[in-house]
Amino acid sequence: MKKIISKSEKDKKSRKNQLIVGLVLILLMVLSTLGFALTGRTEDKNNEKIEYRDVVFIRESGFWISQIKGKNFITTYNAREVENFSFPGYLTIENYRNNPLYFVGDGGNPVSEIARNLEDVALRMQNACLSENCSENLPVKNCSTDNIIIIKEPLNEEENIYQKENCVFIIGSYQNQTKMADAFLFHLAGI
């Protein structure tokens, strides 16, 4: 047989259980907030920082963040990591200001890298073709009048970044294309 429990005993037991559950939830919320706060602080301490030619690069969330001549840059590599790739061109960031920028090639990470850093400079960005026999429905552009960045893999082992009129050619292995794109961006910024 079941023991008969009065309503007041039942209410007392219920309040006791609610109090225990409430205290456990409050303790859980306090500990999780404390853990989040402590974890956030240690991440700030672990941010890597380097200086290259008077520009400070801070590693944050997998990217290098820098401010060069008042413009913020977010790149995969810092300038020290790409100093082996040189760009002998004469272009500066001003050549792209308020002008359309076209990309020729497969795209991917190097295009994203350049687009992320020039989106507030260029008028617009889109893919294009250099010749009339383009397999895609893209506008045909030319190096004498349009700003174009061509990214492709080399036919031989030779990797290079060079300029021909208004076109910039980034010819490199897939593994190096993003490094080369960052080297190009740092050249545009003047470092």
Image (cartoon, rainbow, N blue to C red):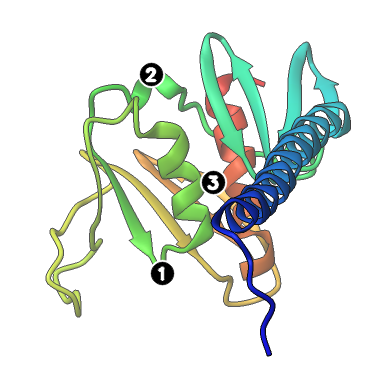
Label 3 Cα neighbours within 10 Å, binned few <14 / some 14-19 / many ≥20: some
Return the mark for residue 162.
3
- For marks 3 and 2, give the CA distance: 18 Å
Q: Quadrant of residue 115?
A: top left
Q: Which residue is mark 2?
A: 94
Residue type at mark 3 is Tyr
At x 19%, y 74%, the residue is: 134
Q: Which residue is mark 1?
A: 106
First along the sequence among labels 1 and 3: 1
Residue 165 lies, with reference to residue 17, above or below; the image says above
Residue type at mark 1 is Asp
Q: Nearer the viewer, residue 83 or 161?
A: 83
Compared across the picture, whether 48 is left or right of 115 comes to right
Helix, strand or loop status at disc 3: strand
Residue 74 lies, with reference to residue 2, above or below; the image says above
Helix, strand or loop status at disc 1: loop
At x 35%, y 24%, the residue is: 95
Residue 138 lies, with reference to residue 17, above or below; the image says below
- For marks 1 and 3, give the CA distance: 18 Å
First along the sequence among labels 3 and 2: 2
- Does the CB distance between marks 3 and 2 fall below 8 Å? no
Q: Quadrant of the C terminus?
A: top right
